[in-house]
Amino acid sequence: MADKDISQAVIARLPRYFRYLGELKERGVERISSQELSDIMKVTASQIRQDFNNFGGFGQQGYGYNVNYLYEEISKILGIDRQHSLVIIGAGHLGQAIAGYTNFTRRGFVFKGAFDKNPELYGKKIRDVEVRPVDEVEDFIRENNIEIVVFTIPKEQAVPMAKRLETTGIKAIWNFAHVDLDVPDNIQVENVHLSDSLMKLSYNIDRYEKSLNP
Amino acid sequence: MADKDISQAVIARLPRYFRYLGELKERGVERISSQELSDIMKVTASQIRQDFNNFGGFGQQGYGYNVNYLYEEISKILGIDRQHSLVIIGAGHLGQAIAGYTNFTRRGFVFKGAFDKNPELYGKKIRDVEVRPVDEVEDFIRENNIEIVVFTIPKEQAVPMAKRLETTGIKAIWNFAHVDLDVPDNIQVENVHLSDSLMKLSYNIDRYEKSLNP
DNA sequence: TAGATTGTTAATCGATTAACAATC
DNA sequence: TAGATTGTTAATCGATTAACAATC
């Protein structure tokens, strides 16, 4: 239960386990061994057992893992057995895409507010939520106990905005702006740098072609 | 020049180096030592030198690295010194966000087409490009030599779509659908699993709070 | 030349895989 | 009980960091 210090490599794999277990659950599969899961997910059975054992014994010798139980335990570990309120700053296409993504709601991420600095968007509705002026965001966060702030704003605005939010009590920033944020320890930052991802893709295209004609 | 087999960990760091070097270049900085870069980027100078030396010597003893030269070399390594044509399948908010992101264009990723299965979107313009019926996508790819296909479609559609595109000559799929794609070796896949990222964020919020009240 | 800083080898650290005893 | 499969320790592999000789 009490996790000491799990490496981020392990954490990064948990959502994928969670996804596969969700599918197995859906299909009515009751139990699964690390070897069977290994075959499906293309990771070693050894790694699966090591990963799960970071959090205590979820399985049973001679039997394997109970799919439902394991699924629930991972959801607890990931903290998606409770609700997290979030607001979005930057109501452009990306902000709207995220606000509208119902799967997040299913996982307990509740979309509470959207903010933009463009007056033309004020009042526009995104999933029953009206876009408000960005200057109201600090008050809104305090009044509504917002945990997570999504940054779908240009990088120039991201750094000063992070500064402004430091004392509002938020717990995390999900940062889509292409800049590294420097915030106090009590605010977690998770970056989604789309252009980095695209550059990696570009590299791997070239790498493959070079492997054919060295 | 000829890279043997560079680990993905190194590749994943290159776009970040590239970003910082771009900023230094912008500010007119001519040379930088691994130690200075280390201070700015919060990675060890040793790692910086190791990373660059995977691709040959970019620096000069006693001097450091020439910012402009290093920037250009990394852009070559990442393959963003040339153009890559791309189309987007799924013209919802996420698709439109990506299509409209001008920074990608700046890096040589040229947006050539958008496809959707919703007839209401046909003809709608996204950056001078009309949304077309998704059934035309294979022909369009062949006629226009498209390299990269962006999947901003639901996961149910992603797997059969990947299958359909196998023989069209595409080189890569940038996959935003929440599913693992199984494609031949000649098609590179780069996943952006947003909900995985959000779950990691959720975990780290909890972890921090537990570190305060163990 | 002397000083600075790389390129590179060696040492350390951490993560993955293999092996097997424990146990259901 | 015998068979299966976990939990866990040990071995291996790879990535990061440290150190320093090469050299600009």
Image (tube, coloured by chain):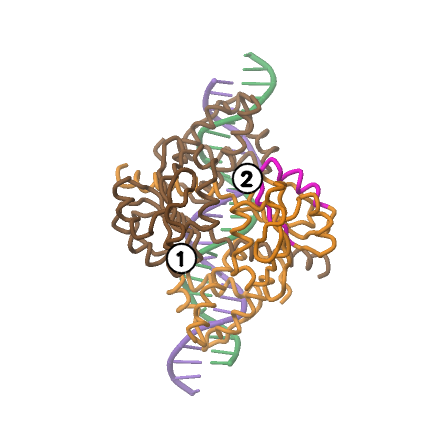
Chain colours: A brown, B orange, C purple, D green
Return the x and y of residue A29 as percentages of the image width and height: 56, 22
Label 2 residue SS = loop
Q: On the rendered structure, is B34 left or right of B122?
A: left
Q: Residues within 10 Å of mark 2 (few under 14, many from 20)?
A: many
Find the magenta span and give its range: B148-166
Return the x and y of residue D14 as percentages of the image width and height: 54, 51
Q: Classify B161 as above or below B60.
A: above
**Residue B85 inside the magenta-drawn segment:** no
Using the rendered view, name the quadrant where residue B24 is placed. bottom left
Q: Residue at x 42, y 43 (%)?
A: A7
Label 1 residue SS = loop
* Residue behind mark 1: A180
Q: On the rendered structure, is B75 left or right of A112?
A: right
Return the x and y of residue B152 as percentages of the image width and height: 57, 45
Which quadrant of the figure contains the N terminus of chain B?
bottom right
Q: On the rendered structure, is A163 left or right of B6?
A: left
